[in-house]
Amino acid sequence: MNTVTVNASKAYDIHIGPGLLPAIGQHAKALGGAGMVCIVSDSAVYPFYGQIVKDSLESAGFTVVSYVFPQGEESKNGTVFLDLLNFLAENKLTRSDLLVALGGGVVGDLAGFAAACFLRGIRFIQAPTTLLAAVDSSVGGKTAIDLPAGKNLAGTFYQPSLVLCDTDTLNTLPEDTFRDGCAEVIKYGVLYDSQLFAHLEERGLEFYREAVITRCVQLKRDVVNQDEFDTGARMKLNLGHTIGHGIEAKSGFSVSHGKAVAIGIAIVSRAARCPDAQRIIALLDRFGLPTATGYSAEDLYRYTLSDKKRSGNLVNLIIPNAIGDCAIVPTQVELLKPFIEAGL
Ligand code: NAD
Ligand code: GLY
């Protein structure tokens, strides 16, 4: 097991390794104070891991209740969120009790937001079960639900008390969902770490999971320690995301987040004439991720303009100078369309 410690407004450990879920009860007990735990999970994850987590928590002396909602992004909404809050109230959880978010980014974002709001804040544990959640969404305290007007439009920064990343859970992940997470792993290599990038080139999908997840989490930890509230350095984590969000939205969310980000990374690498663009695109290809889109620059420009990260007339583009070296470049919106066109 590897442990990485975040030191933001709150300090917490992230444990990464195989076989961790059966020990979650002991880890929860070590946090102290709680008598009751609510496991929050989705309909695909709970049948695999719900009972293991429940048994472990009960063996450690907790009273356990479970809230399970239908899998998928469609559930990350206000209705499920309120229903979860009511469930916590009906089961009389108190301020010293705990939530466990058992699942991918959808479960983590929704449960984290509920933990932030219930009784003005109760503690929660992130137990990520997708590669994306392991390397990205379970770390750093961004919590959210979607609104009809767009993704992640209601949320808070609210750090977990512990992240328990059991790498065995990735064995049941559909291959396509695993590949989606790989786009975020490649992103860390392009942003910060040429050695990580080279390891991915060498091993492809057979990369050393525990070591690679740990490296990505260390990189995210460093960013979160430096810029917890996303006003500077943390923006770099949006590499490929501004154009990627445009692709997701234009497709009516039929193109997954990971694939849209992969296309976004390829487009900015080409448009910025990054000397390593061909290597970046070849690695995305090697992981079976797309690197081009049939949408026009006009289409992507229109959707990109509604990105929530736009500030006035400026969009912060994350531009790769080389593998392991990227810059935040505030770009006037008028220049965005020709930029996208150059990268298609
Ligand atoms: P997800 O949570 O929807 O999981 C993908 C699918 O895999 C779901 O159907 C889920 O039921 C299933 N699944 C999960 N773990 C499984 C397992 N071990 N075995 C079998 N099936 C499993 O999607 P995701 O890609 O993990 O997360 C995407 C979400 O994360 C989006 O809502 C996005 O906005 C959010 N996100 C948040 C942050 C953040 O910093 N908070 C960062 C990136 C993304
Ligand atoms: N996923 C982007 C962030 O945590 O800032």
Image (cartoon, grey):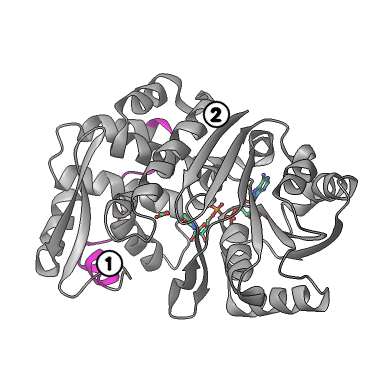
- Between marks 1 and 2 in the image, the one whose residue lies nearer the viewer: 2
Query: Residue 290 appears in which quarter of the rendering?
Result: top left
Disc 2 secondary structure class? helix
Above/below status of 251 relative to 170: below
Q: Which residue is mark 1?
A: 304
Q: Residue at x 51, y 40 (%)?
A: 5
Q: Which residue is mark 2?
A: 209
Q: Residue at x 58, y 69 (%)?
A: 116
Residue 90, given in percent of the width and then of the height, sits at 82, 78
Tell me which segment is drawn in magenta: 286-305
Q: Residue furthest front?
A: 33
Amino acid type, label 2: Arg
Quadrant of the drawing holding the N terminus: top right
Above/below status of 153 relative to 111: below
Residue 231, given in percent of the width and then of the height, sits at 29, 61
Amino acid type, label 1: Thr
Residue 303, given in percent of the width and then of the height, sits at 29, 70
Above/below status of 55 relative to 90: above
- N-terminal of the pair, mark 1 or mark 2, is 2
